[in-house]
Image (cartoon, rainbow, N blue to C red):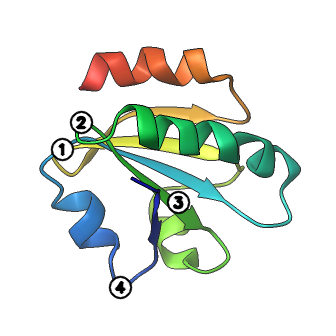
Amino acid sequence: MAEITLDESNFEDEVIFSDIPVLVDFWAEWCGPCRMLGPIVSALAEKYEGKLKVCKLNVEDAMSIAEEYNIENIPAIKFFKNGDVVEESLGFVQQPVLEQIIGRII
């Protein structure tokens, strides 16, 4: 399963009301570390299909959501469970670091 692209129209349904934990990658096209993190996020989407929903939110396309979740630096990953942020990661991180977080929430 590929990552789900988020915007204001689907954020609530895909993230807040999800029945499984959700990883949201807050990113922007111009951000080098965000582009480096992209393949890792894609790999996580495949590896945890059915257990974890993986979403991408371009902060320039959904500024109100980025502001609501206090995104000041990117890349930023927030992990949601039952509609609440339960873990987060800031900056570029390797896949094993994210997998440790995922292991705690699924």
In contact (CB < 8 Å): disc 2 and disc 1: yes
Q: Secondary structure at mark 2?
A: loop
How crowded pointer 1 is (Cα within 10 Å; few <14, some 14-19, many 20+) is rated as some
In contact (CB < 8 Å): disc 4 and disc 1: no
User: Which residue is labeled 2 in the image?
Assistant: 51
Q: CA distance from mark 3 to mark 2?
A: 17 Å
User: Which residue is labeled 1 in the image?
Assistant: 20
Q: Earlier in the sequence, mark 3 or mark 1?
A: 1
Q: Nearer the viewer, mark 3 or mark 2?
A: 2
Quadrant containing the C terminus is top left
Q: CA distance from mark 4 to mark 1?
A: 20 Å
Q: CA distance from mark 2 to mark 1?
A: 6 Å
How crowded pointer 3 is (Cα within 10 Å; few <14, some 14-19, many 20+) is rated as many
In the rendered structure, which amino acid carries the disc numbered 1?
Ile
In the rendered view, tell whether residue 88 sits above or below residue 23.
Answer: above
User: Which residue is labeled 4 in the image?
Assistant: 9
